[in-house]
Image: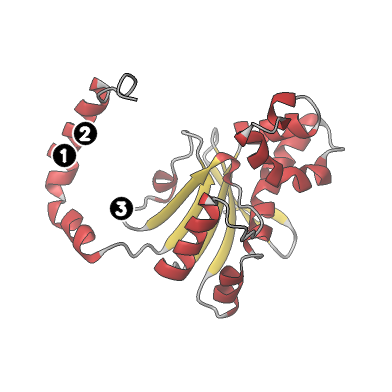
Amino acid sequence: MKDHVRPLPTYLVQRYHGWKATTYAENRAWYRRLAEDGQRPRAMVISCCDSRVHVTSIFGADQGEFFIHRNIANLVPHYTPDGDHHGTSATVEYAVTTLKVAHLIVLGHTQCGGIDGCDAMCSGHAPELERETSFVGKWLDILRPGYEQVKDLPEAERIAALERKAVVVSLENLMTFPFVRAALEAGEMTLHGLLTDIGEGGLMQYDAETGGFVQV
């Protein structure tokens, strides 16, 4: 490993020193308070790990306000307590049972590479994702039930519909977690589904009554 791990790139080192000399220096007391008091985020956001999705910028959030978990295509698996490693499930559990967040948000986005990959895999055009050794393919299989519901649409409409299905499937799967359902039924937490349009800066929210998405 020592032959492959290298010092941080110069541009990142420079950005860090710039942040430490400005943003941190001007808010030192706030950062120290965060460190000493611990985190008390108001909401958990499950978003895609796509570098174009900047959750804190979209909502103008400060440090300590959001507990953010990112993964490919902002997916949440079905509740499966089988003893295997479940990063997303563990993060949801911690947010709900330990941090006791007031809001649980699934944030999807347009032009998602994970959604494109799922569409290609489920339609038989990405055999590499169907291999047993593909972590990405196994993960995207969470969305296969959503694909089955939109597979007969024309391609452009199918991709857009699948972006929304990724949010809805994740919301449905969250409801299979006993501690999530308990917090919701006790009125201790609310559940939300959102979709952001990267190019237009739009934000839509899922309407459980109609089953569609409406502009915020």
Rounded to the nearest angstrom, the CA distance separating label 1 from label 3 is 15 Å
Give above or below for 109 relative to 184.
Answer: above
- Image coordinates of residue 44 in percent, x first then y, are 46, 58
- Secondary structure type for disc 3: loop
Q: Amino acid at mark 1?
A: Lys
Residue that mark 1 sits on: 20
User: At 71% from the left edge and 42% from the top edge, which residue is drawn?
Assistant: 141
- Where 80 falls versus 57 (above or below)? below
Query: Can you tell which quarter of the image residue 180 is in?
Result: bottom right
Q: What residue would you read off at disc 3?
A: 63
Dot 3: within a 10 Å radius of its alpha carbon, few (fewer than 14), some, or many (20 or more) residues? Answer: few
- Where is residue 118 shown, x and y percent of the image? 70, 35
Mark 2: which amino acid? Answer: Tyr
Q: Which residue is mark 2?
A: 16
41 above or below 47?
below
Check if mark 2's residue and mark 1's residue have beta carbons within 8 Å. Answer: yes
The answer to whether residue 202 is left or right of residue 138 is left
Quadrant position of residue 16: top left
Quadrant, the C terminus: bottom right
Where is residue 64? Give x, y as percent. 32, 57
Q: Position of residue 94 (x, y in %)?
A: 45, 63
Please state if 109 lies on the left or on the right of 213 as rendered: left
SS of the residue under disc 2? helix
Count all numbered tags in the image, as a single digit: 3
Residue 36 marker: none
Q: Residue at x 31, y 62 (%)?
A: 39
Residue found at x 30% / y 23%: 2
Left or right? Give the position of 158 relative to 80.
Answer: right
Q: Amino acid at mark 3?
A: Gln
Residue 203 visible in image? yes
Position above or below: 72 against 1: below
